[in-house]
Image: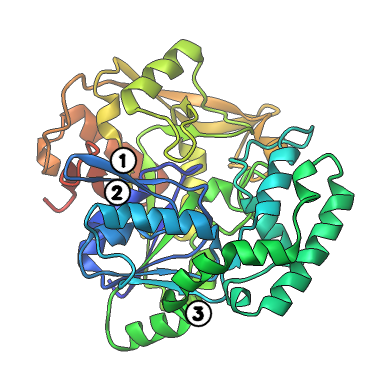
Amino acid sequence: MACTVVVGAQWGDEGKGKIVDALSAEADVVARYQGGPNAGHSVIRGGETVVLHLVPSGVMVPGRRCLIGNGVVIDLERLREEVARLEALGLDVRARLGVSAAAHLILPYHRAVEVAAERGPGAIGTTGRGIGFAYRDKGARTGLRVADLYDRERFVAQADRNLERLRREFPEVPELVAMDGGRLHNGLREAAGWLEPMVGDVSAELHAALAQGRRVLLEGAQGTLLDLDHGTYPFVTSSSASAAGAPLGVGLGPRAVDHVIGVTKAYTTRVGLGPFPTEMPGAEALRLREAGEEYGATTGRPRRCGWLDLPALRYAARINGLDALIVTKLDVLDRFEEIQVAEAYELDGREVAFPAGARELARCVPRWRAFRGWRERSTGARRWSELPALARAYLEWIEGACGVPITRVSVGAERDAEVLRSA
C-alpha cells in the first residue's frame, strides 16, 4: 500500500467504515476526500458501535494520522460534537486530526433551505443536513471555506450576500430573516478557535507523507452510484464519490493513486428516492432489512433493500478502475433458501449496460439468475475454505461476472469477522 482508495461500489452504505478501519492497520495516514455529515460509517469497538460522520474511520487505530480534505464540506458544530464523543471513549483525536483550510463550510442557512427544498416537488430524498446547498455555493464560487473563519470581514460580507440571495429564492423560509453574517460569525467564533490548531494544508502533508514512503489510505463517503457525474442523476449526492474524486478531494495528482478497492454488499440497498431495479417487494425487503439491520447510521431511515445488481457492479468496476473487490454482509444471506441476482438489464426488449441516468434506469427490466442458498452459518469462517461451499460458489460467480477479484469477505459486524482470500 502506497496510496490506496476505498470506494463504495453501490449506492453507499456498503460497510466502508469497517473496511477502512481494518485496512488502517496497514496505513500511516487516512484521509477523507468528499461528502459531509450525511455519511455514517459504523465501526465496532469493544462490542460498541461507533458511528463516524466527518472524522476518517482510521481514527479507531492508535497512531494513525487522520485528515479531512478540501473535497469535504464541514458542519463545524457537528465536527466538534463528534470529536468530543470520540475523546469521551478514550481516543486521542485532536492531536492526530488535520483539516484542510480549503474545505467548505456548511452554515445554518444551508440547512434551512435544504429542508425547505425537500418539501417541494424537486425532492430527491436528502438528509436535510445542508450538504447539497453547501456544494452549490462551492460550485457557484460563493461558498465560505475553513480559512474564511479567520477573516471576519470577508466572512460577514459573503454570508450577507448569500443570505440576500437565498431570501429572494426561498421567501417561505422564516429562519433566514433572523440570520446575518455578523451573528453567524459570532456564533462560530468559539468553535473556530477550537479548530484552528488542526487547520492546515492537507495536500502538502499528503505529498510529504508519500515522498517519505508512508502509506496513505483515501476514504470516500457515499458510493459510486451516488456520484454527481456518474451516478443515477439527479438522485445523487453533490460531490465526486467515485475513485476519481479521491485525489481531487485531497489535493493529489491522479498518478499518486496505486490501488483502488471497491466495497459491495452481497446484496444491494439504497436510501432516498430514485430508481432501484432490484428492489424487493415489501415482505421480502423487510426480512432482509431486519436480518441486515439496514437502517441509516446517520438518520435511522430504513434502507430500501434488493438483490445484488450485477450490471451496477460491473459499471462501478469500470468507472473506478477497481483492482479488487471486498464483499460485506455475506452472513445476512445465510438463512435465505434462494438468492437472486440481476445478471443483466433489458430496455425495450434489448440487453443494455447500466445507464447512469435515472430516467433510463427506471425503464430497465432485470434478467434474473437464481442461486441456491447455503443455509449454513458463515459467521465463524476466517479462511476461504471455511465458507459454506455454496457461498464460495456465489462469490466466485460474482468475481468472474464482474471481472474483479474478491480479496476479502465480511461475515459479521465485528472487526475480526472477515475472511481474507489468501487464507
Q: Which residue is mark 1?
A: 328
Mark 1 or mark 2, which is nearer the start of the sequence?
2
Q: Secondary structure at mark 2?
A: helix
Identified by mark 1, the residue type is Thr
Query: Circles 2 and 1: CB distance less than 8 Å?
Result: yes
Depth-wise, is mark 3 or mark 2 nearer the camera?
2
Q: Position of residue 310 (x, y in %)?
A: 46, 38
Whole-Å distance between the Cαs marked 3 and 2?
27 Å
Residue 405: tell me if it is visible.
no
Identified by mark 3, the residue type is Gly
Quarter occupied by the N terminus: bottom left
Q: Secondary structure at mark 1?
A: strand
Q: Position of residue 270 (x, y in %)?
A: 51, 34
Q: Which residue is mark 3?
A: 253
Q: Which residue is mark 2?
A: 18
Q: Secondary structure at mark 3?
A: loop
**Which of 104 and 282 lies nearest the eye of the viewer?**
104
Mark on residue 298? none
Toward which corner of the image does residue 358 lie, by quadrant? top right
Identified by mark 2, the residue type is Lys
Residue 402: tell me if it is visible.
yes
> Which residue is drawn at the image coordinates 76% and 60% (left, top)?
180
Whole-Å distance between the Cαs marked 1 and 3?
30 Å
Q: Position of residue 214 (x, y in %)?
A: 27, 80
